[in-house]
């Protein structure tokens, strides 16, 4: 596993990306404030979060929004590459630098309103992320936010919920795509995969859930806020996973 040398303390620092990387194309720097206490998995989770956002924009043909996401991904990849130590550092740094170059190429495609080019670069980014994850022995199971116990990395296990909802997932769709509960209910979500590993992220509720084929995932939480909240697949499951989305409605 690649190790990181993390600067002690909580100082924030900024980095500039899209500097010249040997090519003819460059952009203005993009500033990103990063907490120096972040671990390698924190950085990877942030990279993946930007990737999921890019996939969503491209699948919806909203290329005008690609720059910020690709710049942010590149910024975090640069910081991570500079922190690497250990015998695999050079190899992993090379992968991260390639990821940054693909992000640059993705932005160029968006500048030209080139949907096919953007989709092709997204596929390259997907392949690179899989290789980078392998180097770090990482998956989104390691990046669950608001985890409540080591035994249940996606959150609380289901225990006497008020309502249980099973969601089937496959490439590239959820069923159902709309979940409706009442405020105050203890909700148990069960995610069942029909093929590869999928995930559900309800960001506003800090819910991050994974399901593998023959190994469903589950999480329990309280629906304590009314409203309509989006959920998406946050596990990289292929170039179409940006199409996997739904609504979580609390009445």
Image (cartoon, rainbow, N blue to C red):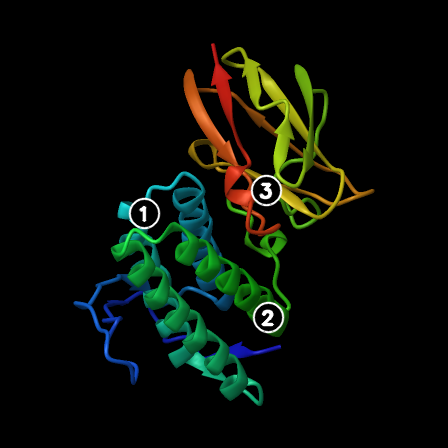
Tell which residue pokes out farthest to the right in this image: 214
Q: Residue 131 carries which label?
A: 2
Depicted 69 relative to depicted 5: above or below: above
Depicted 84 relative to depicted 159: above or below: below
According to the picture, the residue beneath numbered tag 3 turns out to be 148
Q: Position of residue 162 (x, y in %)?
A: 66, 14
- 41 and 81: which is toward the camera: 81
Of labels 2 and 1, earlier in sequence is 1
Q: Is mark 2 on a helix, strand or loop?
A: helix
Q: Is residue 97 visible?
A: yes
Of labels 3 and 1, earlier in sequence is 1
Residue for point 72% across, 26% down: 159
Q: Where is residue 171 in the image (x, y as percent from the top left)?
A: 65, 41
Q: Where is residue 208 in the image (x, y as percent from the top left)?
A: 56, 41
- What is the spatial separation of the Cα atoms under label 2 and label 3, in whole angstroms? 29 Å
Crowd around label 2: few <14 · some 14–19 · many ≥20 (10 Å): some
According to the picture, the residue beneath numbered tag 1 turns out to be 63
Residue for point 27% across, 56% down: 112
Left or right, 52 with reference to 210? left
State which quadrant residue 23 falls in: bottom left
- What is the spatial separation of the Cα atoms under label 3 and label 1, in whole angstroms? 37 Å
Q: Nearer the viewer, mark 2 or mark 3?
A: 2
Residue for point 38% across, 72% down: 101
Residue for point 38% across, 50% down: 115
Crowd around label 3: few <14 · some 14–19 · many ≥20 (10 Å): few
Q: What element carries label 1?
A: helix
Of labels 2 and 3, earlier in sequence is 2
- What is the spatial separation of the Cα atoms under label 2 and label 1, in whole angstroms? 26 Å
Q: Where is residue 54 in the image (x, y as percent from the top left)?
A: 40, 50
Q: Which of marks 2 and 1 is in front?
A: 1
Crowd around label 1: few <14 · some 14–19 · many ≥20 (10 Å): many
Looking at the rendered image, the quarter that the N terminus falls into is: bottom right
């Amino acid at each position: 596993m690649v190790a990181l040398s993390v600067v002690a303390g909580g100082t924030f620092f900024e980095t500039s990306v899209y500097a010249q990387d040997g090519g003819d194309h460059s952009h203005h720097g993009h500033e990103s404030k990063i907490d120096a206490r972040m671990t390698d998995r924190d950085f990877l989770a942030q990279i993946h979060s930007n990737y999921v956002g890019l996939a969503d924009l491209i699948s919806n043909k909203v290329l005008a929004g690609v720059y910020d996401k690709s710049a942010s991904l590149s910024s975090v990849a640069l910081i991570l590459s500079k922190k690497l130590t250990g015998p695999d550092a050079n190899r992993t740094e090379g992968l991260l630098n390639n990821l940054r170059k693909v992000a640059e190429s993705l932005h160029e495609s968006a500048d030209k309103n080139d949907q096919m080019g953007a989709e092709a670069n997204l596929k390259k980014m997907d392949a690179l992320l899989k290789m980078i994850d392998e180097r770090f022995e990482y998956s989104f199971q390691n990046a669950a936010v608001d985890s409540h116990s080591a035994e249940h990395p996606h959150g609380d296990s289901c225990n006497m919920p008020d309502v249980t909802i099973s969601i089937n997932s496959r490439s590239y769709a959820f069923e159902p795509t709309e979940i409706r509960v009442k405020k105050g209910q203890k909700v148990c979500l069960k995610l069942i995969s029909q093929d590869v590993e999928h995930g559900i992220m309800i960001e506003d509720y800090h819910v991050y859930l994974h399901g593998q084929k023959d190994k469903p995932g589950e999480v329990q939480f309280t629906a304590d806020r009314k409203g309509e909240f989006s959920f998406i697949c946050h596990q990289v499951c292929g170039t179409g996973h940006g199409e996997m989305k739904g609504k979580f409605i609390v009445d």
